[in-house]
Amino acid sequence: MMIATLIFFVVYVIVIGIIVSVGFVKQRSKENQYGKDESKIEASEITVLIPFRNEEHRLDGLLDSISDLKEQPNKFIFINDHSDDASVRVIRDRLTIENYSLIDLPEGITGKKRALRFASDIIETKYTLTIDADVEFNSSYLSALAQLGDADMYVLPVVMISKKWHEHFYEIDLLLVTAANAGLSGLARPIMASGANLLYKTETFRKVDNLESHINMASGDDTYLLRDFRENNKDARLHSSRDCSVTTETPQSFREFIDQRLRWIGKTGDIKDHLSTTLAVVQAVFTIGFFGLLLWSIIEGNWKITALLFGLKSITDLFLFFPYFNRVKRLQSWVFIPIYEILFPIYTLLILVLLFTYNPKWKGRKIYAD
């Protein structure tokens, strides 16, 4: 039993260490080079698209962030996806800048994907930046983007901020995935993106966008778009700097958290990206191996091995993921990793059961179109 445990962790440290540690070092090297490119992005070349639906109570942080910006983009375009609350009134009453417009989606056009494409037809700038209506950013956010080198796409950080102690576990779950994404970007390329903070060339988008291949999915425009850029050999980069990040609240309930994770898992499986699939297989192998050893130790009543399993897993993950958590300034969530390791088996089993028994909704709509 002891030998099997040690073999498992040696392999785990090597594989995850290469992805998360070695890969992240390489990713930081790439990012340093991005800042040295002679051709830079200019804030005046960026149009910001903000689709929203019933965000009346989540808009304040975004509107304050926009007003506080040291450097403004060419324009903000708010796209109203048939909201039936006071979102439109809040935007008009709160915004003091002049470089914004607010458009309503016509009847028959719904959803974030259609909203972005409806607005893209009127964009005249070189770059498009998509953000969500519930995000916030610092006053130097646009100035930081203007330090990036010219590229077809930048996958930028989205950092969840917890307000209650138990919400740190929601943060950890996302941060572990984004850390792996950053590592893979350093070794090869990014495998996921978030439309809550995604920058791309407008003209490239118009050439490679393949909406019909994923129109059946209500969410997930971001990762599908990353796939379209990759399949057309476009320069899609990732940047992990906190200066280029936006922040958003964690899910406000456990059900909202589960719905979010099930949506993400659903679109990841539908992407059919061999690198993403390989990572999923590796994760599954380590998860099954960890569960198997854990169950074996419990059945045999070997509580020392049980404690050793949790202890080694916690110490290993604390060490390997520290650089990324530190990079995005979320060490207050990093310290909760040992407790997360204890809850992880229960969480994983719950997700597996719900994958086959539960159909989540998004913005009050079905995830999969009929």
Image (cartoon, helix red, strand yellow):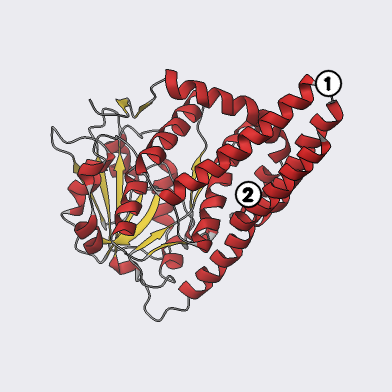
Residue in the image at 20% along x and 58% along y: 206
The residue identified by callout 1 is 301
Q: Please tell me how crowded label 1 is: few (under 14), some (14-19), or many (20+) other residues with Cα within 10 Å.
A: few
Q: Is residue 177 visible?
A: yes
Q: Cα distance, mark 2 to mark 1?
A: 37 Å
Q: Please tell me how crowded label 2 is: few (under 14), some (14-19), or many (20+) other residues with Cα within 10 Å.
A: some
Q: Is residue 192 visible?
A: no
Residue in the image at 40% along x and 34% along y: 266
Please state if 267 lies on the left or on the right of 98 as rendered.
right
Badges 2 and 1: C-beta atoms under 8 Å apart? no
Q: Which mark is residue 330?
A: 2
Q: Amino acid at mark 2?
A: Arg
| Viewer-nearest of discs 2 and 1 | 1
Q: Nearer the viewer, residue 131 or 307?
A: 307
Which one is earlier in the sequence, the residue at label 2 or at label 1?
1
Tell me where residue 283 sits by quadrant.
top right
Q: Taking 344 as reference, is 331 above or below it?
A: below
Q: Amino acid at mark 1?
A: Gly
Q: From the image, which quarter does the N terminus lie in?
A: top right
Residue 33 pos. (x, y %)? 49, 75
Residue 326 pos. (x, y %)? 65, 55
Q: Taking 340 as reference, is 202 above or below it?
A: below
Secondary element at image label 1: loop
Please state if 142 lies on the left or on the right of 234 as rendered.
right
